[in-house]
Amino acid sequence: MAAEEENPALSNLPEESSAVVPDDELMIDNSSPIQPTLPTIPPVIPSSIPVLPPIAPIPIVPPRPLAPLPIRPPAIRPPGVQNGEMRTSDSDSDEEELSPTGTTPGSTGGYEISEASRLVRERQQKAMQEFMMKKRAAALAVPTNDMSVRTRLRRLGEPITLFGEREMERRDRLRMLMAKLDSEGQLEKLMKVHEEEEAASTAAAEDAEEEFVQYPFYTEGSKELLDARIDIAKYSISKAALRLQRARRKRDDPDEDEDAELDWALNQAESMSLNCSELGDDRPLSGCSFSCDGEMLATCSLSGVAKIWSVPQVTKVCTLKGHTERATDVSFSPVHNHLATASADRTARLWSTDGSLLMKFEGHLDRLARVGFHPSGKYLGTTSFDKTWRLWDIDSGVELLLQEGHSRSIYGLAFHHDGSLAASCGLDALARVWDLRTGRSIMALEGHVKPLLGISFSPNGYHLATGGEDNTCRIWDLRKKKSLYVIPAHSNLISQVKFEPQEGYYLVTSSYDMTAKVWSGRDFKPVKTLSAHEAKVTSLDISAGNFPHSDSHICRML
């Protein structure tokens, strides 16, 4: 077969031409011209290719018809929501597509649904309607004032209140009612009600302006307070004049060397050491104070008892008993040998050094925290946890001033050395400076992040120190009305701060970390750490004495 495919011309010749004829049997036909015959070449069949038998033809099988597909019932789908409207078809076009049976896809024309399916569909449609209603109601503006809500309900013809209905429930009812009217297309009714409310509010405002009475923005004080303010103003003017005169003399006198005096004072403070130690009471001590001449020391404790000690021998002179609760603070008068104590029984008491009670000050609504004398010695200031501080007349015991201004309890109180200003600090982390001559709050010092417990004016007249539970002491400049220094003083809260009372050469802080520290009054760098106590240091005081010509004593109590 391969030979035939290679020589197709030879395979087409007749079979006779392939036979061999002998030479003697050749016949010559004269009638026709002699044509040469081509030599016959037998096909060469390679012996290596096997001869295959013929293949039978493949029978043709007719295709088998397919079975018809079963008809699926249309799926039941919940109605969709598009652009806030209900849609019953999944098609995006507005024209509904028909199935081959001529019914709308999703319709129940070709089948029946069960009662349970119908209830489920109705429940879904109702839930969807409620959702759309709430969505529309959330976008509406509803009055927040309960009276306005009642007025609008009345104008819409609805009951202004239902039994047991509260303010927020009434407002939600109005919101759903407005959403229902909006969905029903009754916007004109809503707009009409809104216009009526605006007209009514405008008329009410005009009537209120006509009937408005101008009341005074201040509380009228007593005659005693007026006399006290005048006296304080006269006293402060003379004291400020002396302070300024002394400052000018130091500035203009070439013999005055302030830096040398300050260095000498700081060296004296650096050389301080423990002089004596005495057990003050069975309970922890809460306050201490030196007398104006530095010869006596008063202490008070949580037992409610105050004691007077002689200095420097530290021998007990007398015991002051009278408070029914724990004593919170004690302070000596700057001009007399009188002392005042504050207690948690909501009273302050004035004592003489022989232990007799001179005056009792009542009026606070909560326990007292600190007590302090005005530099003139005529007035006493007290702070309380009732968020007020009060000014009392020493001679008559009359309450001259009840001052508010803090959002939380007031703890510390200090008077300016001129007597014109008072500073208070409280648990709201705020310090305020008050003008005693006018009663105004002239400064609010914000910077601390935790409650304030101690506050003190410097004798230079323009520095104020505050300390509190954020473990820092801040130095404020009253001229610039801002904080100058932030001293990271202790590792625990600061219970008290005090400037040296003569010139303010140094500042002393006490803390619950069982130490008291001395700081320079020039750059507020650390000078000395006084560590001798074995528990929290709750208070401190610095004696005036004859400083800087003699040694001074610092009292640290626990």
Image: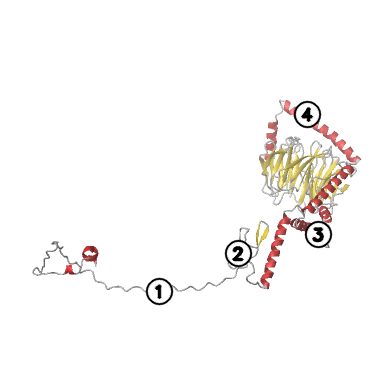
10 Å crowding of disc 2: few (<14), some (14-19), many (20+): few
| CB under 8 Å between discs 4 and 2 | no
Residue 4: x percent and y percent? 23, 66
Q: Nearer the viewer, residue 10 or 31?
A: 31
- Mark 3 packing: few (<14 Cα in 10 Å), some, or many (20+)? few
Q: CA distance from mark 4 to mark 3?
A: 69 Å
Q: Amino acid at mark 3?
A: Arg
Q: Against 487, is 28 above or below?
A: below
Q: Find disc 1 in the rendering and name its residue.
A: 61
Of tags 4 and 2, the one toward the viewer is: 2
Q: Secondary structure at mark 1?
A: loop
Q: Position of residue 232 (x, y in %)?
A: 85, 36
The quadrant where residue 265 appears: top right
Q: Which sits earlier in the primary sequence, circle 4 or circle 3?
A: 3
- How far apart are the alpha carbons under marks 1 and 2? 40 Å
Residue 413 left/right relative to 266 = right
Counting residues from the start of the chain, the first of labels 3 and 2 encountered is 2
| Rendered residue at 91%/40% (across/down) | 223
Mark 4: amino acid: Gln
- Please state the horizontal and vertical placement of residue 317, each as a whole percent of the image: 82, 47
User: What residue is disc 4 on?
Assistant: 245
The mark that comes first in sequence, 1 or 2, is 1
Q: Nearer the viewer, mark 3 or mark 1?
A: 1
